[in-house]
Amino acid sequence: MAGGLAAEIAACRLCAGRFAATATAHEPRPVVWFEPGARLLVAGQAPGLRVHRAGRPFADASGMRLRHWLGLDEATFYDRSRVAIVPMAFCFPGYDARGADLPPPPLCARTWHARVMEALAGLRLVVAVGGAAQRWHLGARGGVTETVRGWRGYLPRAIPLPHPSWRNTAWLARNPWFEAELLPELRARVRAVLEAAG
């Protein structure tokens, strides 16, 4: 059952040694946010430091932008019975010696992802945020821009998005089709999925 699975993930310490060796030298803190009845999946990369501290996914400026993209208020976005938020790694991976984000450890997805997806059998739409999620959920082989530009080819099951980080503001300016064409379709499909979930 998903409740037991969520507790298993929350107790996971497989990467304790890996995280202790990072520049942040932090302990694992899996951020687990799903229930079996969810109809919408937000599939991300990995929690950042603010999310690690808060214990809640997208509890940062990126989350504000993502909710705007989806057309969701905070209460709906965090309603686990409707929206599952499942990153490719449940813990903050840490920073390297230069202060750059480390990638999601593949061990996390290998250990947990198939079981989580099995528990979320009622999903109607996958929003795949970033390259790691797009490779796993969509089988994407190109870069993020190429994948997001081809978003219509993943309908109706999924929609790929770039990461909503404010670092991507220049990307948005270079790709005006994203806000003009993709976002209206995304919001309409998210609304339809969540209304259908009753």
Image (spheres, rainbow, N blue to C red):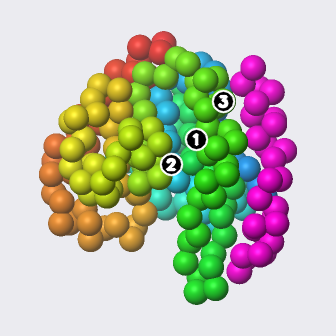
Q: Residue 132's spot in the image, x, y percent?
A: 47, 52
Q: Residue 79's spot in the image, x, y percent?
A: 59, 31
Element on which disc 1 rests = strand
Q: Which residues are magenta?
A: 1-27
Which amino acid is tagged 1? Val
How busy is the neighbourhood of tag 1: few (under 14 within 10 Å), some, or many (20 plus)?
many
Q: Residue 119's spot in the image, x, y percent?
A: 64, 23
Element on which disc 3 rests = helix
Q: CA distance from mark 3 to mark 1?
A: 12 Å
Q: CA distance from mark 3 to mark 2?
A: 17 Å
The reply, left or right, for residue 95 in relation to residue 134 is right
Which amino acid is tagged 2? Gly
Q: Is residue 47 visible?
A: no
The reply, left or right, for residue 8 in relation to residue 94 is right
Q: CA distance from mark 1 to mark 2?
A: 6 Å
Lower position in the chain sequence, tag 3 or tag 1 = 1
Look at the image and say whether residue 112 sits in the magenta stretch.
no
Quarter assignment of residue 168: bottom left
Q: Are marks 1 and 2 in contact (CB under 8 Å)?
A: yes
Look at the picture and state if 43 lies above or below 80: below
The reply, left or right, for residue 30 in relation to residue 187 is right
- Camera-side mark, 3 or 2: 3
Q: Which residue is mark 2?
A: 44
